Image (cartoon, rainbow, N blue to C red):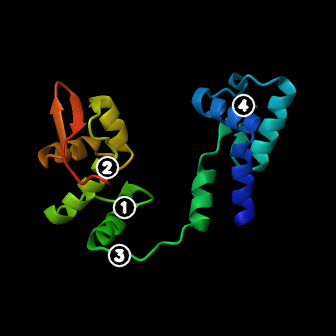
Amino acid sequence: MNDEAIRQVLGLLYQEDTLRTLAALTLHGDPEESGLGKEALRRALDRLERGGLAVRDDDGGWTVRRERFRELLHTTARPAEPSSPEEKVLRSFLVDGRLRAIPTKRDKQLIVLNYIAQVFEPGIRYPEKEVDVALRAFHDDFAALRRYLVDEGMLSRENNVYWRSGGSVEP
């Protein structure tokens, strides 16, 4: 994979018809929700398939091939050298954005929890289900993560509603 593949995918996302088709496929599972005519939709799906963003399944339906973005990211991303002790901890516990394990040492756990807390905007209140969805992206034991975040004062909770109450804040 090379720069040409990246340019191809970005070009597909820039075009109105392919972007609308990919969005309809992603959000509704049905490319016809794009509102395009039959011929325009067929051309858009063909281009998305050539670009590796959509595939036809055995039943003749279409699905988004999300792993294409990961493939492109992995071919271009070169890991930078960790510049701080916090980055070293994050690199050792996070793989492809997911926690390999929840750290048991408190100092490392605080670094990881602070990183995870950045997902939540200060001043916004989140229902428990939204918190669980966000935390599940990091680790399957999202309940433990939620509990640790509350125990360490990075999230506060009242009546199954959460808000960010700690952790570092980007300027």
Tell whether label 1 touches label 4 (CB within 8 Å). no
Mark 4 and mark 1: Cα distance apart in space: 35 Å
Q: Can you tell which of label 4 and label 3 is closer to the viewer?
A: 3
Tell whether label 1 touches label 2 (CB within 8 Å). no
Residue annotated with mark 3: 83
- Give whichever of discs 4 and 3 has the lower sequence position: 4
Q: Can you tell which of label 2 and label 1 is closer to the viewer?
A: 2
Q: Secondary structure at mark 4?
A: loop
Mark 3 and mark 1: Cα distance apart in space: 16 Å
In the image, 52 versus 37, the foreground residue is 37
- Give whichever of discs 4 and 1 has the lower sequence position: 4
Circle 4 crowding by C-alpha within 10 Å: few under 14, some 14–19, many from 20: few
Residue at x-position 24% and y-position 46%: 145
User: Where residue 45 sits in the image (x, y, percent)?
Assistant: 77, 37
Residue annotated with mark 1: 94
Name the mark on residue 61. 4
User: Where residue 9 sits in the image (x, y, percent)?
Assistant: 70, 51
Judge left or right: residue 163 versus residue 52: left
Residue annotated with mark 2: 118
User: Where residue 115 sits in the image (x, y, percent)?
Assistant: 30, 55
- Give whichever of discs 2 and 1 has the lower sequence position: 1
Q: Secondary structure at mark 1?
A: strand
Residue at x-position 27% and y-position 52%: 169
Residue 131 appears anywhere in the view: yes
Labels in figure, total: 4
